[in-house]
Image: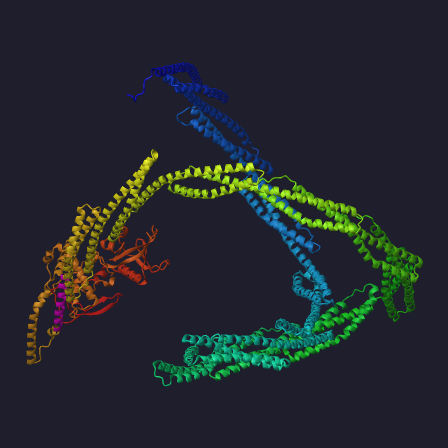
Amino acid sequence: MSSMPCFCPIQAWERLEKAEHERELALRTELIRQEKLEQLAHRFDRKAAMRETWLSENQRLVSQDNFGIDLAAVEAATRKHEAIETDINAYNERVQAVVAVAKELEAERYYDIKRITVRKDNVIRLWDYLRELLHARRERLMRNLELQKMFQEMLHIVDWMEDMKSRLQSQDYGKHLHGVEDLLQTHTLVEADIAVQAERVKTVYTGAQKFITSEEGYKPCDPQIVQDRVTHLDLCYQELCKLAAERRAKLEESRRLWKFFWEMGEEESWIREKEQIMSSEDYGKDLTSVMMLISKHNSFKDEMSGRSGPLQQTIREGEGLIEEGHFGASEVKDKIEDIRGLWTHLEELAALREQRLNEISNLYQFQADANDIEAWILDTLRIVTSSDVGHDEYSTQTLAKKHKDIQEEIHNHRPTIDALHEQARSLPADFAQSPEVDGRLPAIEQRYEELVALAQQRKQALQDALALYKMFSEADACTLWIDEKEQWLNTMEIPEKLEDLEVVQHRFETLEPEMNNQASRIASVNKVASQLLSTEHRNKDEVTGMKDQLNRSWDQFRSLADQKKEALSSALSIQNYHLECNETKSWIKEKTKVIESTQSLGNDLAGVMALQRKLTGMERDLEAIQGKLDDLQKEAEKLASEHPEQAEAILARLSEINGVWEDLKDTLKKREESLGEASKLQEFLRDLDDFQSWLSRTQTAIASEDMATSLSDAEKLLTQHENIKNEIDNYKSDYERMRKVGEEVTQDQTDAQYMFLHQRLQALDTGWNELSQMWENRHDLLAQVYGYQIFLRDVKQAEGFLNNQEYMLSHTEMPGTLEMAEAAIKKHEDIETTMDANEEKINSVVDSGKKLMSEGNVHSDKIKEKVDSIDERHRKNRKAASDLASRLKDNLELQKFLQDCQELALWINEKMLTAQDMSYDEARNLHTKWQKHQAFMAELASNKDWLDKIDRDGKQLISEKPDTEPIVEEKLKYLHRLWDDLESTTKTKAQCLFDANRTELFTQSCADLDTWLNNLDAQLQSDDHGKDLTSVSILLKKQQMLENQMQVRQKEIEELKLQAQALGQEDTNIVEVDSKRKRVEERFQELLKPIEERRRNLMASKEGHQFNRDLEDEVLWINERMPLATSTDHGNNLPTVQLLIKKNQTLQKEIQGHQPRIDDIADRGETMAKAGRIDSEVLRARLGDLQKMWKTLIEETDKRSARLEESQKAQQFYFDAAEAEAWMGEQELHMMSEERAKDEQSAMAMVKKHQVVEQSLEDYAQTIHQLSNLSRNLVTSTHPESDRITLRQSQVDKLYAGLKDLAEERREKLQEGLRLCQLKREVDDLEQWIAEREIVAGSHELGQDYEHVTMLRDKFREFARDTSNIGQERVDSVNRMADEQIDLGHSENATIAEWKDGLNEAWADLLELIDTRTQMLAASYELHSFYHDARETLDRIQEKEKQLPEEVGRDLKTVERMHRMHTTYEHDIQALSTQVKQVQDDAARLRSAYAGEKAEDIQRHEDTVVEAWNALLNASKGRKQLLSDTVEKFRFFNLVRALMLWMDDVNRQMDTQEKPRDVSSADLTIKNHQGIKSEIDARDDSFTASIEMGNALLAKNHYASEEIAEKLTQLQERRREINNKWKEKEDWLQLVMEVLQFGRDATVAEAWLATQEPYVRAADIGSNVDDAESLIKRHEEFEKSAAAWEERFLALEKLTTLEQQEIRRKQEEEEEERKRKPPPPPSPPIPHVSVTTEDDAEAMSRAQQNELARGGEIVNHLETIAQNGVRSDMESPQVSEASEPINGTSAAPEAKGDHSPVKKTPQSSPRPGSVGTLLSKTQDTATIQLEGILCRKHEWESHSKKASSRSWQNVYCVLRNRTLGFYKDAKNASTGIPYHGEIPVSLTDAKCEVAHDYKKRKNVFKLRLSDGKEFLFQAKDEAEMSSWIDGITTSITTSSTKQDDRYPANPQGLTRAMTMPPISPNSGDTVTMRRDKDGKEKDREKRFSFFKKK
């Protein structure tokens, strides 16, 4: 009770009052809310009623369809409807307001909310219905509007069509072509409009379909109305299209007509125009105009050809119009005839004009070509007649190249001239015979030959000049080089130092190749000089002097070089000797030290051995040193003899080395003696080992079988072998010493080791003796090989010589010119010289070969062959060279003669041109022409001997070489003809000149001279000597022209004198002639002196005027320069001063350059003053003024130069000071800048920039110092501006000091700003880094799967670790930096502290975020790890489940392997159980930690894994059971398969048993068959076990029960079959045994009968009693014997089982045959033959048919035995008896289809007469004659129809009894199943032959049947084809009668009872006939016996 709270009524009452008050307030609030809701509901009802009323009214409005019946009304209704839609859509807000009120009431939970909701739904339903009505009405309205628009479109289209119809029905089709074209274009536009309207019609039709269809729905009008309108529209459109097509056709016809007329009119006008042109007589005036006319004519032809085609096409079109019967056909026909006539006439005119133009063109072309050739010849003649051959080598080479081009051009013009001849010949006769054609060609030919000769002469001149210049050039170059090198050799001194000597020696080594090069150049110079001297060159003396001088210089240089080289070699050898002495001395001392270093060795055996090895090496070195000392000894003696002055020093060095060498040997000797006797034995053994190893190596090297294949190899081998000999000789002393020491060591020693040593020494002796013999043998062989290789080398060289000789001799042609002939002879002389030089070598090769053969070389045969070949070729070459030399000499003489003839012909042609010159029509030139002609005639007379000499040379050449007579005679005749023409022409010209009018010529010449002299006299009377220099110069030029004219007139006067003398001899008026001549000559002489006087006056006037001009020019020049020299402008700044200085310097240079001109004027003035030509005082005064002005100018220039120098110094100082002030002002502005850095980079840049500024400021101190020194110097030198300079310098100094202070302050501020920026950068970087880390640390990404969360966890761990390590370090670093700046009192301390605090806070927040995210990731990793494990486990389970294969194996081995694999698989899946258990544990743990969806997800994963695991276990168990059952199944199958295979083997054994041929083999076969039965019985247990296993599997309901049951059934059936088959085989063998026994007994019986038959048939009954008794006794014995054989014959007569069966079958067949046919007539009885009755045959039952079949096999087998001729074990023909019944039954098994058909030819049928005891088959039974596989092609189905399928097919063909059947294979043939149901074809009247016409395949034959069918058959080879053709042909030709002949019927049928045939008493045997396979009858003897003879 005490624990309960006490009750207080006051508190409870207060709580009650409070609750009551709160309830009252709540009720009041609820009442207010309800009242508001009632008001809201009332408002809702009011608005809802209004909305319902409005909606109902509008529904009635919208339901009305008053749209109108036309387009305007419907469009108005559409606009009205749109207004209604707008009002209704605007009413949507009001409806939504009602809905909003209802929703508000519903939200406030109004009590009557259901009613409100119903009414709201009603309003919404009405609204939706109204909208649906509105939408439906709009759709109806749109359809009405669309319909009305379509109707309106139809109206428009129909109206347009009506308009078009009226236009298309117009009858206007045009009156001309252009009118028709316009109408067609218009119609095309109309058609385009119609096509456009077609689209409109189509659109209307498409739109109307929706109103026509019978679909349910709203229809604006009746569909029939729409259909009618559409139909009407379509009809209108079709009618319009028809009218358009008709009008186009009419317009096209009209256009064709008018186009034809237009084209024909155009052609007619063109033809008439061209006729006028073709009729023109204008054929051109020159080649250009003719070519232009031809070009125009060709163009006309092309135009005509181009117009021909269109014209013909137009004519064809017109003819087409005529054929079509066009209304204008008559006009068209007339037009065509007119045009054709015009065209033909035009073609004739064109052909005629073309011919005439071509003829005129050829004429003008010939003239133009002839003009070109003549002009070219004249131009080229001017060039080749030039005497310029160049002044140096380059110019001569240039001229030679140009001349070569000219010669090529001359040669290239030869075809042009030939073409000119061809042109002349091709011209018409009237043109060709004209003078302008016929007379030009000979002149052209003559000038061309002259041009060729002159070109050749100029070529030779150029070559000679070029050779001369080249020789001079080369000589100068060689002389220059010799002088240079000679100077070097003269100045060269032999140095004493070795290094200097080597340098000089190197220079000498480079000199030798240069000397060789120069020697070749000098030799070439000498050769060229010799050639020039041999040709009698005009510079012969100069060439000789140059050659001698060059050779002397070269000889002197060579001797000097040899002297210097010898001195150098001598000095170098002395230095090398001293060097080698030093090296040898050092070497000896080194070895002495090595020996002394071995003092510590030799105390024990190891030491002795080591010392011995060192001493062995030392001995080899000492030998080398000894050889070196010997060489030095020889060198010292040689040098001492060559250099006596240095002999003492040389020998002293050698003595010094010998002393050191003796010391070394003494040291070594002492050391060897100290070793004692112990080392001697070791030394001996070591030497012995070394010697034996050397001996073995040497023997191996000598025994080598290497043979040399080249000379180098032979030399190498021989040298190696000689070295081996030297080595052997060197080892000889070692061998003798070793033998001696060995004998001492082994003497009186019995120890085994010493005995072994003794044996080694004996073996050493043997090897040493063999080595010498081996070396000798090998040396002989190598020497022979070496000799052979040398011979081969010489042979190769000789063959090269011979090859070159043969090539050169065989490729030398006879030259066609003199130069080429001389060159060919020189070349041949060189060849002969070379051959002479090589002859000795070739003879030496032959001699060496013969010597080798005589010595018996191993290669003697090859050597002999080579020697004979070389000797024979050498003799041939010698003979060929001799023949060629004689022919070349003959050709040279001929070419010399031809050259002389050509030169004379050219000279004659040249003179002929002069003689033919008849241009002397003017009288003025007559006298000159006469004089020249007189000289010309004298020249001809002097050159007459030239022709006589050539004539003599030609006759001598003909007498010596008759083969040249045709050429020489022709040339001589040609020259005489030319000479005669020249003489006649010359005489003609002389007569013409003589007949000329010389008097008139003389008078005219005198008159001309008088006139000219009068004019000259008038000019000389003038006193004008020029007023100035220009006029004087003009007068001087005129004077020069007069003087030139005087010289020309002087010659004319001399000619007048000669003419006067000539006229005096024949003219009577000689006084007048002389008076005229004298008067002219006197006047001419009078004028000579005035001309000279006027010339002197003019020259004096020119000199005076020139001096005045020069003087005035110089004064003017000085006055122009004086203002510059006296100027006071010194410049205000440095550039101005410098410019002024340059100008002053230029002026000074001009003055210096002008000084010679002043001096020249002064000299000229003095000269003129002395000569008195000008007033001397005035002249001297003017010259004095000039000199004063010149001196003044020079002085003023020097003064100005000094003033400018001072001004430059001052201005330079001011300029430098201004620059310094400006630079410091700029720096001061920079220092005073208040710019602050924005970041660290800019702060760093500012600091660096300031450092650069400070450095530049420090560097500028030097500039300030230099400026101060300059100012000090200027002040010291009392410069005019010293005060100003001092003031300026002080200003500069103050400015520099202030600038340095500012720089210091600026540096401190910048350093402080840089530190602040660095801190700011660190803080910002760190805060940025923290912010970036916070983004990562604050991420809510916890991973989407296991891999993701694992990656996130690992990365975040690394992130946290890096952040903690790096971040803390960076934060601490920044804090330290901030503290340092604060401690240093930075101006921004507050800001730095703020940065520090913010950074620390951000770092703390980051660490907290990292911790939080680490925990979240850990939890997420645990969850996703479970998911991952679950999925992985599930995947592994599913993977294992997929690994369960569905296949169970195809055999037992595979199934057992799978079973083992499954066991392994089960072990594998057991490992998964642990993972499944782990998943379950993890799921249980996580479910306790998670709830909700996570827990369900975990449970789901666990369940999935568990379910999959259970499914896997069940699948594995089922798989195991399946594999077990499969193993049992395959075991059963294997047992069955084994038994089946065994049964197959047994069956094969029974089938392949050798068929017995005799009784013994039959008995053996039966025993083997019994063995098979024993084997079958032994397998009964296996069969029982298999059957029991199969039944057991079936009993347990195995999954393969059906297959097992089938196998079990097959096994049982096969077992029964094998047992039955064995029984049948057993019966068959018994039958065979019985038959073979019968055959054996029958053979024996027949043999007995054969032996007794002669006795019985003998007719001898005895001639006396004794003989008769003897015969009786013998007959009694025969009867006894016959009685004894009776039982045997009775046994033979007993039928065998096979015969009984066959008889029964035959009787049954005969019975059936009798039922079908009447019985044959009875045959006569045969005695002693028992015939089986029909009762016995009928007794044979039908059940024995199978036995008969097997009997047939027996018969076949026995028949095969008989045919193969195999005898039985009794060696008698017993098979014959058995073979007869076999022949009778042989067809039976074949008819039933043997599985192994044997191919049989027709010849294999039973032979005639081979009748047995058993009857044969009936004659109508089909017998297979031939069968096998052929490839068939069906060609023809009948006579006129080819087969439908003509492909090749493989078929099995069977030929029997004139039919050919086709089967798929042999099996179908045996069962009678034809190929594709084809019946056998009949061969009656068929034809079979080889298919020769079929080429695609080989071995094909053709079969043509009587009904027209035709087949092609292909056999595998030709033999098979032949056999088939023969068989088919035989079957075709064989008739029934021939069948009866071949197989004669036996009427009685012989039986087995006929053991003997019937005997005829008259004959003992019968001859039967049979046909062989060739159809020929052959005789065959047959014994009358039951058995056949084989």
> Percent position (x, y) of residue 1805?
22, 62
65 is higher (above) or lower (below) than 879? above
Magenta highlight range: 1630-1651
1964 is higher (above) or lower (below) than 1171? below
Q: Examine the rendering and report whether any part of residue 1016 can be seen.
A: no
Nearest the eye: 904 or 467: 467
Furthest-front residue in this view: 2
Task: Please tell me whether the stretch drawn in magenta is mainly helix, strand or loop.
Answer: helix
Nearest the eye: 1585 or 1930: 1585
Nearest the eye: 1116 or 1318: 1318
> Percent position (x, y) of residue 1218?
73, 45
25 is higher (above) or lower (below) than 1746? above
Q: Is residue 1509 left or right of residue 430?
A: left
> Percent position (x, y) of residue 849?
50, 81
Nearest the eye: 176 or 1045: 1045
Residue 1637 belongs to the span the image colors magenta: yes
User: Where, quadrant-wise, is the C terminus in this rendering?
Assistant: bottom left
Residue 974 belongs to the span the image colors magenta: no
- Residue 1770: name its quadrant: bottom left
